[in-house]
Image (tube, grey):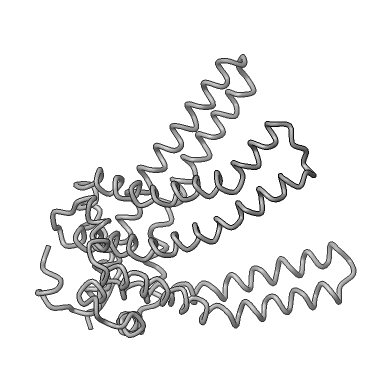
Amino acid sequence: MNNFTAETRRQLKREQKTRVMENLGRCIGIQLMYLVPYVLLMVILYVSVFGRAFALIAGGVSANDYQLMAALSRGLNTVWLCIALMLAITGPLQFGLMHFYIGLAHGEDVTVGMLMYPFTSLKSVWAGIRMVFTLWLRGIIWSIVPTVIYSTIVFAAAMAVSDTAQYQVIAGALQVVYLLVMIPIRVKLQTYNAGWLLLAQDENRSAWAATREASWAFRGNLMKLFVFDLSFIGWYVLIAVVLWGCILLGTVGLTAMSTGMAIAVFAAALVAALCLTAVLNGFLSAYMESSFVRVYEHLTEPSAEFYPEG
């Protein structure tokens, strides 16, 4: 196994940052395209659940009317269909996104259309669904014990402590401990994500075996993976500053200007926030994921056939 040093990490990140910048438009485009199905499903869900009810209210039906309750009840049936559709498309879309990032990491000529690649084959669709379910199940397995312990202690403290201020201090301390315990678990779960690379190599491979084998590559390097994740924290801070900075400017304009101008300024600030965060998120997602691909490859010394030199 290669020695993954701080200099190696910086070198791999520099390499991927350059490639992402060369394909920035595609990186942003595929992120936006990835969100489109979910936005459409949320709109359909909202209209299905509340659309008929709003129409009845607009027609003068009271909040306690049986018709309104029946309309909401029928609309709620659509929730399960939308959830099922979201689950069905999440795996293939994630698989397509990973194909894009793997190609990007190798310097290939990637396209936004790669997102839809898994939908060209039922085998690829099923492979994506299997992998998403496997990652979800592994997350449950690793998280359930500390979560149950944390919840039990918090509940016991609520029953035993009558003073509200004292309970809030205890609950806050317990939450900090819980979050600290979850950090290494989250890092461990991240190692399973490398299973996407093995599944891209062979879609017939067991998703459970792929995640297990991928995780093995990080044995003895979990702290280095944690440092790798922390090295991107500045970008998250930048995104937060840009987002809330735009919202703050819009809010100030909303309160300091006349009605018409204030609304225009606030709307412009929201548009700016959406556009800037879309660009930054598209860049950061591609930067992190392609760098993660190269980190995994460095640790496993893969063959040139599967991971060609880029």
Q: Residue at x 47, y 72 (%)?
A: 186
* Residue at the far right in the pictured view: 162
Is 180 positioned to the left or the right of 186 in the image? right
In this rendering, the count of numbered labels is: 0
Q: Quadrant location of the N terminus? A: bottom left
Residue 16 placement, left or right of 169: left
Q: Among all residues in the image, which is located at the extreme front?
A: 67
Q: Specify the quadrant that holds the C terminus.
A: bottom left
Q: Could you say which quadrant of the image residue 160 lies in?
A: bottom right
Q: Nearer the viewer, residue 62 or 95?
A: 62
**Vertical order, 103 against 303 (above or below):** above
The spot of residue 174 in percent (x, y) is: 69, 72
Q: Residue at x 40, y 38 (%)?
A: 276
Corner quadrant of residue 171: bottom right
Residue at 20% of width from left, 53% of height from top? 19
Q: Is residue 62 above or below residue 302?
A: above
User: Which residue is at 57% across, 15% downward?
Assistant: 260
Residue 9: horizontal and vertical position, in percent?
28, 66
